[in-house]
Amino acid sequence: MLLRTTVVKNLGSSLAPDGCVRHCRIRANTWCRWRIQARRRYGFLPDDVKSVRSVVNPDVSKIRNIGIMAHIDAGKTTTTERMLYYSGYTHSLGDVDDGDTVTDFMAQERERGITIQSAAVTFDWKEHRINLIDTPGHVDFTLEVERALRVLDGAVAVFDASAGVEAQTLTVWRQADKHHVPRVCFLNKMDKPGANLSYSVESIKKKLKANPILLQIPIGSGKGFTGLVNLVTSQRMMWPQSDDSNGRVFVTKPLSSSDDPELLRHVREARNNLIEQVADLDDEFAELLLGEFSENFDAVPPEKLQMAVRRVTLAQKGVPVLCGSALRNKGVQPLLDAITAYLPAPNERHHDLVQWYGNDLCALAFKVVHDKQRGPLVFVRIYSGALKAQSAVHNINRNTTERMSRLMVPFADQHIEIPSLTAGNIALTVGLKQTVTGDTIVASKSSASQAARRLLELEEKKVKGSDKEAETLILAGVEVPDPVFFCTIEPPTMAKQADLDHALACLQREDPSLKVKTDPDSGQTILCGMGELHIEIIHDRIRREYSLETYLGPLQVAYRETVLQSGCAVDTLDRTLGDRRHVVTASLQVSPREETACDIAYGEGVAENLAPDLKDAVENGIHSAYLQGPLLGFPAQGVTTVVQAVSVQSGTSVAMVSACVSRCMLKTLLKGRGLGMYGSSRQ
């Protein structure tokens, strides 16, 4: 009560009298309720728990934008929970099975014990600010990983030490490769009976085609796992078996001759292997090694070795490998040290397009979340300049200017409002109602024009038209995979159809991998998603968040049709409409290709003999056949079509040419022996 009175008094004294003081009292009551809720959920108020406000706008070299990625049930969320606890931002450890973790805040996540949406949290660790995104491990939500990696500077790949590389690990690793994201590997669950360090490292090497650099070795195995040895510093870290501090307290001391001889031998061999491996990957370290420490590898300073490992990691020539057990509170603090030591700061990542904006704002919207009170909340990564609350920004993709009402630092589902945020950070904005995932945000339209002029001056070439300039200055968006499953969705009554359309529009804006279309024959609404679980979650969210009891039809697989062998066919269309005769003959050949996209080619001399309108008609007929294959009517993929000959009688309409070519394509596809179907790829 005293806190509330003080706030009202202070706010009231700084504002005009009359109704303003009453407004401040309402704001103060709301603020106090938020503080009470924060104490109940995350414990911001106790003296030993930090506030996100304390790390706003650090130096860019002290920022780490990282993601946690892994196969399902490898321990991503548990590792994130320990990071928040040890960094001082939560006062108790949450548990996935109990449904009380910070980043799994959705009702569906807590009920199922899995991560569905990527969640962003911000905290500090040893004078570094860490913007962390906890991503899902289920294949149905692979888009969440894709758009997180698009804006991150580094990633932590978590592995189950008893299983090594698993199916979804391969997928997220390929996504990280595509975005050139440096990584650190964390072999989790070292306390499991089947945990095997050498097997896990070997699987990283063979299955991921990576170069693992082992920086730690465990002390003990299974239930006897008690600590780690840091090969860089030759120090051992031991956690007590019965620990009331939940892993906060552990002992670090240098290895000595009194330690277990077998352990010392193992450490010496592992450190020598580490030094040799890093020397093979880093020329600067190799010169140092050959010049000063060729006779005694043990004399290599830990600082020099750590700097070399960092250079190798940033160059993506190798991936540091650490181990521990997040559930048993062991090895997480060294992992945080490795994140700050080996993963890049934002200014160490090169984005060619950003240089044209100089000190002006350039940001990428990578995620949208709908809030019932505040409307759409847009997550943005700031690449240059600064983002300020109550300012207008220009969306290059939509060619619109919007006013941002508030700016916040994300902390799962609790957010801290701030006045501004600088380059290198991840922010949450309120008020951008037209912005969607993948849009480029700049300070103003004139700022985009100035950036275009800088680009043109440097490249010494002229670009006519503002559309071309806009295309040049747009950040690469997020690649959205095609849906894999689909089903019909119906409202309880026709009166609720508008409400269902609104709910689906909001969910589509949040989740670009969710597609909604209308069946042209039946008029039913078709829901397309990445998998059975994905559609089930969407159905449950419509019921909970929009109070609509919808009905789903049978789930079907979104197949794609293709040919496995070459085939050719000739077809003639001879039709008289009124007093006009239309005659077309087409000869086509199809063959399989490795790429999923379909291709069109022409035989020798065919394209030159076709008028432009007839050539367009031929290609339209082929594309229409691609959209609806001959087996079950699913789109065709991985097909190359060669137009061998097309003869058209004078007076034949272009529509008849398209119809003939389309019919000939269906015959050709059927004659292609080995015609088959496969499920659409999720990633």
Image (cartoon, rainbow, N blue to C red):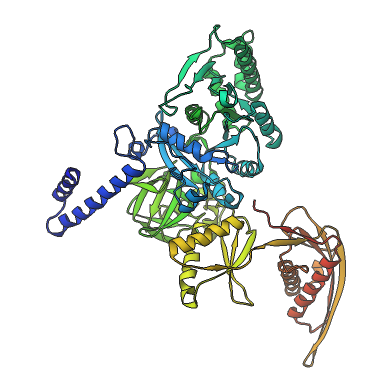
Seen as rendered, the residue at the extreme bottom is: 579
Residue 66 or 584: which is nearer the viewer?
66
Residue 201: x and y, percent? 65, 29
Seen as rendered, the residue at the extreme left is: 17
Quick check: 304 left or right of 105? right
* Camera sees residue 114: yes
Residue 580: x and y, percent? 79, 89
How many tags in the picture?
0
Residue 127: x and y, percent? 39, 29
Above or below, comparing residue 120 to residue 128 in the picture? below
> Residue at coordinates 54% horizontally, 28% vertically from top-left?
324
Quick check: 667 left or right of 146? right
Quick check: 173 left or right of 14? right
Above or below, comparing residue 436 to residue 233 in the picture? below
Above or below, comparing residue 190 to residue 42 in the picture? above
Give the quadrant of the N terminus: top left
State which quadrant residue 517 falls in: bottom right
Residue 355 or 72: which is nearer the viewer?
72
Above or below, comparing residue 40 to residue 641 in the picture? above
Residue 343 or 490: which is nearer the viewer?
490
Residue 448: x and y, percent? 46, 53
State which quadrant residue 390 falls in: bottom left
State which quadrant residue 207 falls in: top right
> Residue at coordinates 64% horizontally, 51% vertically from top-left?
683
* Camera sees residue 465: no
